[in-house]
Amino acid sequence: MNNLNPPGLDKITTWADDMRVWPNVMYGDVYNFLISSKAVDGQEMKNFKSLQSYNYFQSGNVGAITHHVYTDNTFLMRAEVRSSQTVSRMNSVYVHSTQDGTVKNGWCSCMAGRCHACSHVGALLWKLEHAVRNSLTGIACTDESAQWNKGTTRNVEPKALSNITFKKPKVGESVMDNNEDYVPSVRDTPLFSSDAEFKAAIKNSPISKLFEIKGTTVYKSFNCTPMSNVIIQEEHGEHTSISSCRKCYTFFNKYIELNDTKRKNLEHGTKGQSSSVLWKDARKLRITASSATKVPIKDTTDATSFIREHLHPKFTGNKYTRHGTQQEPVAKEHLRSLENTIIDTGMYVSTEEQWLSSSSDGILNGDTLLEVKCPVPTKWNTLEELINGGKYDVIKTTEGHYQIKVKGSRGYYMQIQLTMYCTGLRKGKLYLWRCPDDFILINVDYDQEYVREQVQRLKDFYVRKMIPRIVDEVDSDRLTFSRLFCNFMR
């Protein structure tokens, strides 16, 4: 067997170029593989020099990444990485990982490739980490192909990730011959609000000794004086309205408030929705129609988890969102075949409440909001069976009409009502789709009183709890914006 290539490479015939489904590789995963994982001799690699591979990635030496999905739903990532010694030579690099980001092994055609953790392997991992950290990966029902990973055009859609069995290699077991080798991972890397909080967490972590090695970049970074903003931070005022706190109001005017022209430009420039960087930045600053159902109802409920996930999302998709991504275009095309017109849309910001936005699945026949749902068949075979089960957000009346539950567990009613509020449309349709022979179109009328109550509740939450947190995150450089968004808001 060639140790420079992954086992069974010659049997792989299909490679996909779809970064939406890249594994969720984070900093802890890169560190664990390069430093803590076991080499062929069973000892920890401790390849600290390979951490310098970040420079390879930053210098643009990593080509387009493609991937192959194994039968156990793990990923083999492939890319060409330019050699540091001979710039005309490209090294073939492979990384084997799980969907959650655990790096299982790496291979490279360079001279150091037999160690499985050379700088070229590290460079590929840093590109994956950069994409995940900047929300360039992940699947939503309105996703389109991302443009950041430019390169090949071969495309084979992977299947959903199923449960993976992890195990630790036994003593004497060859990790090279075993595709089940396991590398532990630091998951859910926390976000620290202060330098003191970060240092306290490091001192109590298993890797604390790493930060005590003098002369290393890690040691210097850990012991340096925390960077402070040049601008003296202004204190918050009362949060009874958008304008009651001068600090938040200044931020609102700079990054959130839009005139009519910018609102139209935002809608036009974000039609790619989750594949648009502008869309991602703009929605982080607002409550959205789809996230409104997750906003805590009681004032006493801790909102930390909701706000953290909204600003720094970790969710990158599951089998339900993947199913929706695959089926939504099919469902819309079927609707068009029935002599309907569907206009794809971007982000709509409410003209009255600019902290609220929505992104619909389209406008049907010029005057009707369209919301597409493609439920995954589990314990039911038809949409009728799903609805009759009583747990879905749709009910069937005694007259035989379908209606959306106002307090359904999935929040369809609130999502559609708030989307109509943001778009200005007063008619809506919920489009349930399973196949051409099994679909349901449900009329949804605008509920003005319901919308008024929900908008007021959400506004109170946004003013008192959400915008102060957003402003603080930006002040502390934990929340940053793309250059595209900053230029758009000028």
Image (cartoon, rainbow, N blue to C red):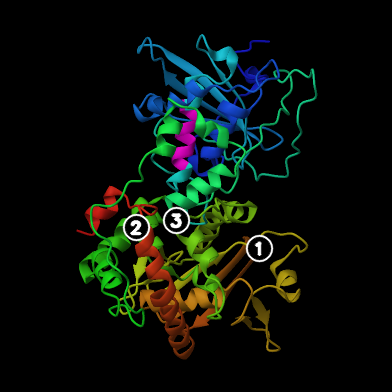
Q: Badges 1 and 2: C-beta atoms under 8 Å apart? A: no
Q: Which residue is mark 3?
A: 193
> Which comes before the other along the chain, label 3 or label 2?
3
Label 2 SS = helix
54 vs 5, nearest the viewer: 54
Nearer the observer: mark 3 or 2; the answer is: 3
Label 3 sits on what residue type? Ser
Q: Which residue is mark 1?
A: 437
Give the CA separation, mark 1 to mark 2. Answer: 50 Å
- Which residues fall within the magenta stretch? 123-131
Determine the image quadrant of residue 301.
bottom right
Nearer the observer: mark 1 or 3; the answer is: 3
Label 3 SS = loop
> Which comes before the other along the chain, label 1 or label 2?
1
Label 1 SS = loop
Please report the residue visible at 36 percent of the width from the left and 55 percent of the height from the top.
476
Mark 2 packing: few (<14 Cα in 10 Å), some, or many (20+)? Answer: few
Q: Percent x, y for residue 84?
A: 39, 15
Q: Is residue 443 left or right of residue 480?
A: right
